[in-house]
Image: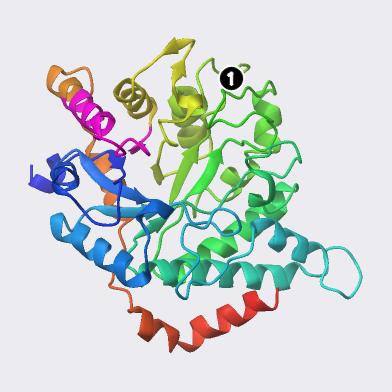
């Protein structure tokens, strides 16, 4: 087998600052690390974040540089020329009304604006060396979840699927893959999985007919999916991101999804207990990978001495060496498929592109 066929880099980590230090370089050089995720703390300016992305790619060109950059309140970079992207609920509102009367008459306008939002989002990030954003949100706006809130497009799963596909198309136009989240749906539960362990007591059939419907309708086009740190006890006692039922039997077998599966952040409270047992970050990563995730995401553990990141890497390596975990060539192939296929234009060249300027104009008029 070739080196590419035997490679396995399932861990997505973070860094503490605005430049790499020796520990960052050591961790990013580890063959088990497949990428990193940026946060607002990593930003000083466009020039700085572009230089940092270049520095990361110099460590390993195949590292997937990620960010959680959706628009609205989840937009990590907002200054130095970055477009202020609307919350996704604004696109759902545009679908229902375009100022000329009947509900739904703005649907085509909203689809065009969603494509523009995806294109601007991805083009600006790629101009700064960023490969991938965890967007769009496919959760339904039930009005119950504060953590989802206006991040959701709409209550109607059909509207969500259509707008999400349009936004993903815009991202693809800029050369960036996308990630639908949070499978099978986080919008109905009030508890925030960052600080609690949410429970959704609906049945599998109910979930598939409503919250999870966009994943079925978009199964042929989704590049990646992120499951929720939510327990659905009528389906499995484990949160969806640790559940073979949800990831293997439902998402892969029943819905036919072929793309990459990321865990949500394993430092969140919703990921710290599995069937009532407190687990380490390494144990959580191994549980997620064993259930069917291709990539395990751990955030905010590089702060301080970064011991949490080192423990994650060491724990996964020990499990692989002991044979209690298995490297997956298929997972590695799905990770690499998310890397951009071609270089992106720089910031100045991007500003001169008519398609980008038109997309920005559409958003300004939203």
> Foreground: 268 or 114?
268
Residue at 36% from the left image edge and 23% from the top image edge: 284
> Foreground: 168 or 69?
69
> Foreground: 293 or 147?
147
Q: Which residue is mark 1?
A: 235
| Left or right relative to 192: residue 7 | left
Q: Residues within 10 Å of mark 1 (few under 14, many from 20)?
A: some
Residue at 15% from the left image edge and 61% from the top image edge: 58
| Left or right relative to 217: residue 253 | left
Residue at 20% from the left image edge and 21% from the top image edge: 319
Relative image position of residue 221 (x, y in whole percent): 49, 55
Q: Farthest residue in the front direction? A: 304
Q: Is residue 43 visible?
A: yes
Relative image position of residue 114 (x, y in whole percent): 62, 67
| Left or right relative to 191: residue 301 | left
Q: Is residue 59 above or below residue 194?
A: below
Q: In the picture, which quadrant includes the N terminus?
A: top left
Q: Is residue 341 visible?
A: no
Magenta-drawn segment? 293-317
Relative image position of residue 167 (x, y in whole percent): 56, 63
| Left or right relative to 358: residue 123 | left
Q: In the picture, which quadrant includes the C terminus?
A: bottom right
Relative image position of residue 278 (x, y in whole percent): 42, 13
Displayed quadrant of residue 92: bottom right
Is residue 295 on the magenta stretch? Answer: yes
């Amino acid at each position: 087998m070739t080196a590419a066929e035997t490679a396995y880099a399932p861990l997505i980590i973070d860094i503490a600052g605005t430049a790499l230090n020796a520990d960052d370089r050591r961790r990013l050089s580890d063959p088990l690390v497949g990428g990193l995720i940026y946060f607002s703390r990593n930003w000083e300016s466009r020039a700085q974040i572009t230089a940092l992305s270049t520095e990361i790619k110099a460590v390993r060109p195949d590292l997937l540089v990620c960010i959680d950059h959706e628009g609205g309140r989840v937009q990590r970079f907002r200054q130095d020329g970055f477009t202020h992207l609307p919350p996704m609920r604004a696109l759902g509102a545009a679908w229902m009304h375009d100022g000329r009367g009947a509900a739904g008459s703005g649907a085509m306008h909203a689809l065009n604006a969603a494509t523009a939002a995806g294109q601007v989002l991805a083009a600006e990030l790629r101009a700064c060396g960023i490969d991938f954003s965890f967007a769009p949100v496919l959760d339904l706006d039930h009005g119950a979840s504060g953590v989802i809130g206006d991040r959701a497009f709409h209550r109607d799963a059909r509207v969500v699927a259509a707008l999400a596909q349009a936004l993903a198309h815009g991202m693809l136009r800029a050369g960036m893959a996308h990630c639908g989240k949070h499978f099978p749906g986080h919008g109905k539960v009030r508890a925030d999985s960052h600080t609690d362990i949410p429970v959704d007591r609906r049945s599998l059939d109910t979930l598939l007919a409503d919250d999870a419907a966009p994943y079925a309708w978009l199964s042929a086009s989704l590049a990646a999916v992120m499951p929720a740190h939510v327990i659905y006890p009528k389906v499995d006692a484990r949160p969806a991101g640790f559940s073979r039922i949800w990831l293997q039997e439902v998402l892969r077998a029943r819905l036919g999804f072929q793309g990459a599966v990321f865990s949500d952040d394993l430092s969140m409270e919703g990921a710290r207990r599995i069937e009532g047992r407190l687990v380490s970050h390494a144990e959580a990563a191994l549980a997620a990978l064993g259930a069917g995730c291709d990539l395990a995401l751990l955030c905010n553990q590089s702060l301080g001495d970064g011991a949490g990141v080192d423990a994650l890497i060491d724990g996964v390596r020990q499990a692989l060496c002991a044979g209690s975990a298995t490297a997956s060539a298929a997972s590695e192939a799905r990770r690499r498929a998310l890397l951009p296929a071609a270089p992106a234009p720089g910031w100045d060249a991007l500003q001169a592109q008519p398609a980008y300027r038109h997309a920005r104009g559409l958003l300004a008029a939203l």
